[in-house]
Image: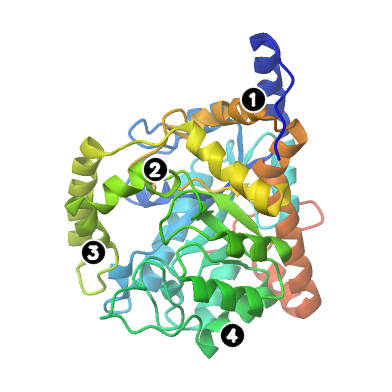
Amino acid sequence: MTVAAPAKTPKQLDAEVKRITKSAILIDTHNDIPSFTVDGADIGNSPKNHTDIPRLREGGVGAIFFSVYVAASYVNGNHSANRALQMIDTVYQDIIRRYPDTFTLALTAADIEHAHKKHKIAALLGIEGGHAIEDSPRLLRDYYRLGVRYMTLTHFNTNNWADSSGDIDDPTVQHHNGLTPFGKEVVREMNRLGMIVDISHTSDKTFYDALETSQAPIIASHSACRAVTDVPRNMTDDMIRALARKGGVIQININCGFISQKSADAEKNSPLRARYMQLMKQPGIDPAQAKREMDALEAEMQKQQVRASLDDVVAHIDHVRQIAGIDAIGIGTDFDGITCTPVGLDDVSKFPNLTRALLLKGYSAKDIRKIYGGNTLRLMLQVEKVAAATAPHSRDLNSMLLAKPHSSHRSAEPSL
């Protein structure tokens, strides 16, 4: 049980927040700003989005897994890989290369720590949607060589080898009862490469199959607790405990509909939300048409949304601590991939508000540093260790292809 923090003056509390902001390596494991930079948004200054450089600095963000999000609509005609490459390219061209004084490519836990020492933000890549590999282990390996360090096995759509929570109750979708034999091979290949297995968006059975199959710890890159907010996208207590027993981390999402029951209930009863979800997982629709309709729906949904609060975020963090321990908690906001953020955690600049709220709840500076990045760094090291033990020669080849001088920890951009 979390104990009440000793009383501090506002000045003492502000000083402690500043110390933690400076010392913690705050790793956000899921940020969707590439979905906007790919269409021309400038991360240098983008007030319409949740993420830009001035606010990242203000919030003390130390590392970001930029989401290589591939909508289900790209499955039609086998355009998923093309879209994934566009999204990878925008991270390199429009974020890292455009702002080299701010961002540096990171491929390992050591790279993140090195970036922090150099006062740069470590930029990492995570694919959202296993359909991006188009059922090809070759593409999976290519993505790893391009710098991708995790893959979410599904999005809201079930693919050819893994079931999603987004359509698990849809009788028109052919499901697999979790992972297919090929899906388990995908997980094993990710272990061999050193790519983190991410189970956000998957069905419960897919989660358990992935957990059983994986030799390395796995993550939920942007999820929350079903016991606190009862939606299928969240994890049950049994799932969170099982994840923690194998060294995994649940990265707390801040989407209002995942962390507040009032917000979730409002969304559930919204015809706008129903149409939005239909577009998101409709394979046959033209991607450009889907995006136009979804943008219009987002604008309307924002007028009707029931916002969550900072206390809701803390409630999910605190629940995980109580049932699974401090080592199982991380942060995966889903900024710029959501239409509703909690009051007080409106964008990437507001992390000090969360730090203050956790201190007031009784969390120590050491606890907060674990939540903000320490647990994720530990998991990354374990994933790297499993890969090195499984296929050391492959790791040498990957390093050579990436032209990455590990001895100096200088993050180089792969030759594209």
Q: CA distance from mark 2 to mark 4?
A: 35 Å
Q: Residue at x 28, y 53 (%)?
A: 268
Amino acid type for the residue under numbered disc 4: Glu
Residue 230, x across and y down, in percent: 43, 54
Q: CA distance from mark 4 to mark 1?
A: 45 Å
Work out whether 36 lies above or below 211.
Answer: above
Residue 411 seen in the current view: no
Amino acid type for the residue under numbered disc 1: Leu
Work out whether 29 lies above or below 4.
Answer: below
Q: CA distance from mark 2 to mark 1?
A: 22 Å
Tell me which label, 4 or 1, sits earlier in the chain.
Answer: 4
Q: Which mark is residue 278?
A: 3
Work out whether 240 lies above or below 23.
Answer: below
Q: CA distance from mark 3 to mark 1?
A: 41 Å
Mark 2 lies on residue = 256
Mark 1 lies on residue = 360
